[in-house]
Image (cartoon, grey):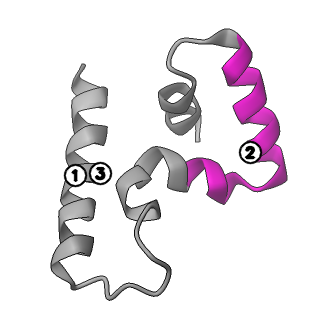
Amino acid sequence: MRLAILKLADSDLMEIDKRVDAANVDYRDILAAAESPAYLLLPPGIDPESADAQRAIQSDKQQYLDWLGG
């Protein structure tokens, strides 16, 4: 959860407070936004095996790894 909040806040202390407040309401929103931003843009109910979904999954994974290694 801490990593997700830090990633989304992007070094903005005020944003950290907002994200912590949001996590206290529903932590899943924070995790999804941090870990799967491209996948969240896909239409609801998309087949996770579709080419678009797989591209989004790979893009999200790479973005997160790049941020961690950054």
From the viewer's perspective, is residue 24 above or below residue 10?
below
Which label's residue is closer to the chain start, 2 or 3?
2
Q: Give, as a single range, the part of the protein colored magenta.
A: 14-31
Q: Position of residue 7 (x, y in %)?
A: 47, 29
- Disc 2 residue type (three-letter): Ala
Q: Which residue bears the numbered disc 1?
A: 59
Lateral position of residue 60 relative to residue 33, left or right:
left
In this rendering, the count of numbered labels is 3
- Disc 1 residue type (three-letter): Ser
How far apart marks 2 and 1 lie (CA) works out to 24 Å
- Give the quadrant of residue 46: bottom left
How far apart marks 3 and 1 lie (CA) works out to 4 Å
Q: Position of residue 39 (x, y in %)?
A: 38, 63
Which label's residue is closer to the chain start, 2 or 1?
2
What residue is at 22 percent from the left and 72 percent from the top? 52
Closer to us: mark 2 or mark 3? Answer: 3
- Disc 3 residue type (three-letter): Asp
Q: Which residue bears the numbered disc 2?
A: 23
Closer to us: mark 2 or mark 1? Answer: 1
